[in-house]
Amino acid sequence: MSCDLGDPAILENYNAIISGAPTNWLVLGYHDTRDKLSLYSKGTGGVAELQTALKEEVLYGFVRVDDRFALISFVPEQVSGLRR
């Protein structure tokens, strides 16, 4: 099963993060679909700010800390086993 990452805002903000621009994190989510990710939020405040953007649904994050990068899969306990 593949996932649509066609939202141009995803690539734009990903490139900003890896190029060292002020934007240093993003969060992606499904909204009401199962196969298309969209940009939920982005910011310049690092991991602490990224944490405030997490909601009670399956989300994916990408963050730059110093000169390193991390991918984050966020699956809260409230999400059903089927959605995990």
Image: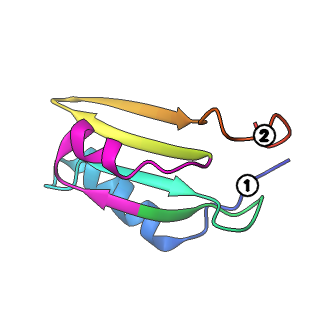
Residue that badge 2 annotates: 80
Residue 52: percent from left, percent from top: 32, 48
x 26%, y 37%: residue = 47
Packing grade of label 1 (10 A; few <14, some 14-19, many >=20) is few
Instruction: Work out whether mark 2 precedes mark 1 in sequence or the reverse, and give the earlier one.
Output: 1
Packing grade of label 2 (10 A; few <14, some 14-19, many >=20) is few
x 57%, y 57%: residue = 29
Residue 3, which numbered label? 1
Residue 55 on the magenta segment: yes
Residue 31: percent from left, percent from top: 63, 66
Left or right of residue 5: residue 63: left
* Amino acid type indicated by mark 2: Ser
SS assignment at label 2: loop
Q: Nearer the viewer, residue 28 or 9?
A: 28
Residue 73: percent from left, percent from top: 55, 35
Quarter of the figure with the C terminus: top right
Residue 82: percent from left, percent from top: 86, 39
Quick one: which residue is furthest to the front in this view? 78
Q: Nearer the viewer, residue 40 or 62?
A: 40
Q: What is the magenta range?
A: 41-57
Left or right of residue 21: residue 9: right
* Amino acid type indicated by mark 1: Cys
Residue 5 drawn above or below residue 84: below
Task: Examine the image and state in which quarter residue 36 appears.
Answer: bottom right
Q: Nearer the viewer, residue 21 or 48?
A: 48
Task: Examine the image and state in which quarter residue 14 appears.
Answer: bottom left
Q: Of discs 2 and 1, which sits in the foreground?
A: 2
Q: How far apart are labels 2 and 1 at the CA level?
A: 20 Å
SS assignment at label 1: loop
